[in-house]
Amino acid sequence: MKALIHSWQTRKQILSGLSSYVPLLRRRFNKGTRGSDSARYCYSVWLRHLLLAAESGWTCSQPVVAELGPGDSIGIGLAAMLSGAKEYYAMDIIDYATLQKNIAIFEELIELFRKRADIPDEKEFPLVKPTLADYSFPARYLSRMELESCLAKDRLDKIRHSIIDPKWPGSLIHIIIPWHDPQVIPPGSVDLIFSQAVLEHVSNLELAYRAMHRWLLPGGLISHQIDFKCHSKASEWNGHWTYSDLTWRLIRGKQEYLLNREPYSTHLRLLRQEGFQMVCDRIQRHASNLRREQLAPRFRNMPSDDLTISGAFIQATKCSPIPAR
Ligand SMILES: C[S@@+](CC[C@H](N)C(=O)[O-])C[C@H]1O[C@@H](n2cnc3c(N)ncnc32)[C@H](O)[C@@H]1O
């Protein structure tokens, strides 16, 4: 019975992947990512990264921040700007955001910061990770005085202008979509690089880690929440590791991206290889119902730990010097 369900699931996923070759049907794949299209989501995600960075001992006043995969809006980056970031780079491979959405989210974020609202928690966003022990506004890391200068009228006007016209020479916001080349940001120019639910989609992870190392200043921080689950592509949360490479290619079809299917241990290896030192490692686990022989050959020897790691929040600093390549 299980085998029957599995093959029915597989066929359904392949059909969906094949439909991406039909131009009219392909549109539904690029509709949006349904995450960063709400100000409260963006506020919640940014404050989680900021709070945990501060708790990892990372301090930097007026950092330059960069985000991989902002998705439906640049709202998470705008939340960073409203809490003191000097400049923001947004890098994606698909431009989902619209000016109207970015502006609406920006105005809502200003109100959330003015009120020093608590961080929206698991009740409001049950799927958002990492979870926190305390969701009250992180006043110890964002004082009233600091916030006042972040929310000063002149500064808000400058950010608004940058949202409307990121190509303006004085713009504080740089939108680089699509990005494929590490040269898009000058080396050693960024203090913090973050992403939320993105690194599991990046096709060339090694290039991404190498690029992040190049962009960061020494002592700079990367902060990433990664979701290793199958994103509804299988009946088990880790069922995407049962598909052969050919089946997975058919499931992906002509979509710009799907999942790179790399488990947690790949990220650990790349962090070390590309010259990062982990400062925060929060793993999320799910029991696995799969037997090793059900895994596709490529995954059959994966470390046992990977099979139960469904997500991870990692923060790491750039070690200097850059490792020899
Ligand atoms: C699940 S969405 C997450 C969006 C947003 N971070 C959020 O929290 O809602 C994944 C995003 O990763 C982006 N993405 C995929 N491959 C990428 C790459 N190589 N570099 C940057 N972004 C990428 C997608 O275009 C999409 O915007």
Image (spheres, rainbow, N blue to C red):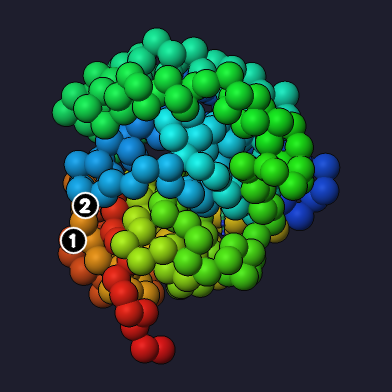
Quadrant housing residue 24:
top right
Q: Amino acid at mark 1?
A: Asp
> On residue 173, which mark appears?
none
Percent position of residue 5, x then y: 42, 46
Residue for point 40% across, 23% down: 147
SS at circle 2: strand
Q: Nearer the viewer, residue 145 or 191?
A: 145
The answer to whether residue 127 is seen in the rendering is no
- The total of numbered circles placed on residues is 2
Q: Nearer the viewer, mark 2 or mark 1?
A: 2
| 303 up-or-down from 105: above or below | below
Image-based side of 308 in relation to 299, left or right? left
Residue for point 48% across, 48% down: 65
The local crowd at label 1, few if under 14, some if 14 to 19, many if 20 or more residues have their Cα within 10 Å, is: few
Percent position of residue 232, x then y: 46, 42
- Circle 2 residue: 280
Q: Nearer the viewer, residue 129 or 14?
A: 129
Image-based side of 264 in relation to 155, left or right? left
Image-based side of 303 in relation to 180, left or right? left
Quadrant housing residue 293:
bottom left
- Circle 1 residue: 305
Percent position of residue 6, x then y: 42, 51
Residue for point 44% across, 35% down: 84
Q: Amino acid at mark 2?
A: Cys
SS at circle 1: helix
